Image (cartoon, helix red, strand yellow):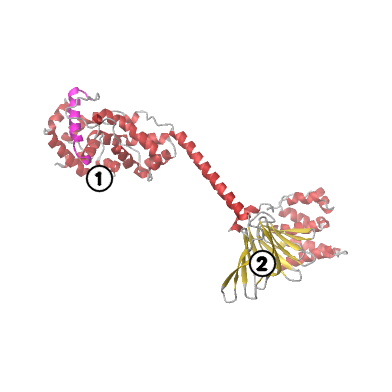
């Protein structure tokens, strides 16, 4: 076979070989090209629309099934048989882990070098620090209450508001779907530090909301103004001092003015909740520098003097207007979904 | 034979799998010769013509089953190999067939063409497919290799052996056929 024959047999673009070309001339009238098959309309079934509809339907069914599963899992997660005990594990001094359960009315006490972990029904976990003491008060779907008699606990809960709460004497700490650390002494004093979501501190008819990254110091009688976890001790001391001055019947006016000035000068925008609490607790402060500082932190460019006057007179609607401008509202508990992990 | 790139084919297959009929029409234009070639190596020309359309309709319906969109060519060729005519008589062109293909210049040439095609169809599958794709559809060895998932070297071997067997089977000097084709 010649090279030309070989080339042309394998590639019709090569130099033609007469023998192969003769066969081509004879046969190519039968080809798809000669019959113009490529140009004939292809009667495709109307499958594309139907297939598309079927796909949309399949996707819709899959989404609905997923949502249904998530909903059922959510309901299961929130449900809990009445008074069913909580599983607990205690890490003992020698490092061994002892599994146990905590029943309603029972107490769990950790030694000086022991820690404990409690399953808060199915909605979260509670970790107990050394030398702490908790009691399970009540547990059922939608309401779980423990008492922290003494010591420190860390709770990580993902559930709708008020499903979980911690009590200590007259004090109540109601979870709004969050992660927090609570430290109490038998005397009734202690601190609450919130790292995610919101917690309500309550005593008798008084309530204080504490948002994430804020802490609240309290004693058996009262609570201070919430401050950021990363606030300087100088800032905290000034806030506490101002609060204390205004709680007195005869406040030292020059001292109050100096403290308010210093707080306004040192406050960062993220301290908005401290400023708001000071102004809500002591409306007369609206006349001073804290009001414009809070306005700036909330992005309010122009001071409305009538609003300021209403605030100073104790008008609740003026507070509500600025409350609505807070960067994060306490009702969106489900946004803190990471706490469920 | 076709200016479309591998990427074009890949894009068309993916679009067609997502329901684009326009993309599938591009695939039809791109692969109609190889499908027709495979069918013409087994069926009478008029049947191959009908079954070519049928193959593409089957491919359209089953397109979701194609896992590797890059293999659309070999996949549809495999469909063409499996497709069957309803009537046994549609298989193979009998030597001496009087089926006339009206694209030929003269009835004599049409008869010669059907005779050669009949001989090609009597050869083993590997030879008859490559011969039809090359001699009828005008595809190169490289294009045949892509369509059939063979190596170009295997196609080259099949072409050489196929032409030799064709020459032996026809038992005539191909130049005579060529001379008539020139007339």
Number of residues whose C-alpha sits closer than 10 Å to that of mark 2, classed few (under 14), some (14–19) or many (20 or more)? many
Q: Position of residue A187 (x, y in %)?
A: 76, 71
Q: Report the side of A239 relative to A109 (left or right).
A: right
Residue B81: which numbered mark, if any?
Answer: none
Instruction: Determine which residue is flagged by label 1.
Output: B152
Above or below, B91 relative to A64 = above
**In the image, is residue B107 part of the stretch drawn in magenta?**
yes
Q: Chain of mark 1?
A: B
From the viewer's perspective, tell me whether residue A192 is left or right of residue B75: right
| Disc 1 element | helix
The quadrant in which residue A169 appears is bottom right
Q: Name the outermost residue toward the left.
A: B172
Q: Residue at position x 66%, y 67% from top?
A: A153
Magenta stretch: give its range: B104-126
Residue marked by disc 2: A153
Residue A312's x, y, as percent? 83, 53
């Amino acid at each position: 076979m010649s090279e030309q024959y070989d080339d042309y047999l394998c590639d019709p673009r090569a130099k033609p070989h007469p023998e192969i070309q003769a066969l081509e001339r004879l046969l190519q009238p039968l080809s798809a090209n000669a019959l113009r098959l490529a140009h004939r309309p292809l009667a495709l079934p109307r499958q594309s629309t139907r297939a598309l509809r079927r796909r949309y339907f399949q996707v819709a069914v899959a989404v609905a099934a997923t949502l249904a599963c998530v909903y059922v899992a959510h309901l299961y997660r929130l449900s809990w048989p009445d008074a069913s005990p909580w599983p607990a594990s205690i890490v003992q001094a020698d490092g061994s882990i002892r599994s146990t359960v905590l029943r309603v009315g029972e107490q769990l006490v950790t030694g000086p070098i022991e820690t404990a972990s409690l399953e808060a029904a199915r909605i979260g976990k509670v970790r107990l620090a050394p030398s702490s003491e908790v009691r399970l008060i009540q547990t059922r779907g939608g309401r779980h209450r423990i008492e922290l008699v003494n010591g420190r606990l860390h709770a990580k809960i993902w559930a709708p508001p008020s499903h979980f709460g911690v009590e200590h004497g007259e004090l109540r700490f109601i979870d709004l779907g969050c992660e927090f650390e609570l430290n109490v002494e038998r005397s009734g004093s202690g601190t609450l530090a919130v790292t995610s979501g919101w917690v309500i501190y309550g005593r008798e008819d008084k309530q204080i909301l504490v948002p994430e990254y804020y802490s609240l110091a309290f004693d058996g009688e009262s609570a201070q103004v919430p401050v950021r976890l990363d606030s300087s001790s100088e800032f905290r001391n000034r806030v506490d001092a101002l609060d204390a001055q205004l709680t007195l019947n005869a406040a030292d006016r020059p001292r109050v003015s100096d403290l308010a000035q210093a707080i306004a000068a040192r406050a960062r925008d993220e301290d908005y909740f401290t400023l708001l609490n000071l102004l809500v607790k002591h409306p007369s402060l609206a006349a001073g520098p804290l009001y414009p500082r809070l306005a700036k932190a909330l992005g309010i460019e122009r001071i409305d003097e009538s609003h300021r006057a209403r605030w100073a007179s104790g008008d609740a609607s003026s507070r509500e207007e600025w409350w609505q401008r807070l960067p994060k509202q306490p009702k969106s508990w489900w946004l803190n979904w990471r706490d469920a992990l | 034979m076709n200016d479309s790139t591998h990427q074009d084919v890949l894009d068309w297959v993916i679009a067609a799998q997502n329901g684009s009929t326009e993309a599938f029409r591009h695939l039809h234009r791109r692969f109609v010769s190889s499908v027709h070639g495979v069918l013409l190596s087994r069926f009478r020309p008029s049947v191959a013509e009908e079954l070519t359309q049928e193959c593409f309709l089957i491919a359209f319906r089953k397109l979701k089953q194609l896992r590797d969109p890059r293999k659309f060519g070999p996949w549809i060729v495999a469909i063409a190999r499996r497709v069957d005519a309803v009537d046994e008589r549609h298989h193979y062109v009998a030597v001496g067939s009087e089926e006339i293909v009206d694209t030929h210049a003269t009835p004599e040439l049409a008869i010669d063409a059907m005779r050669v095609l009949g001989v090609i169809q009597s050869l083993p599958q590997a030879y008859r497919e490559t011969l039809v794709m090359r001699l009828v559809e005008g595809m190169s060895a490289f294009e045949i290799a892509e369509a059939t998932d063979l190596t170009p070297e295997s196609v080259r071997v099949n072409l050489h052996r196929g032409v030799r067997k064709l020459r032996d089977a026809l038992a005539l000097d191909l130049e005579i056929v060529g001379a008539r084709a020139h007339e």
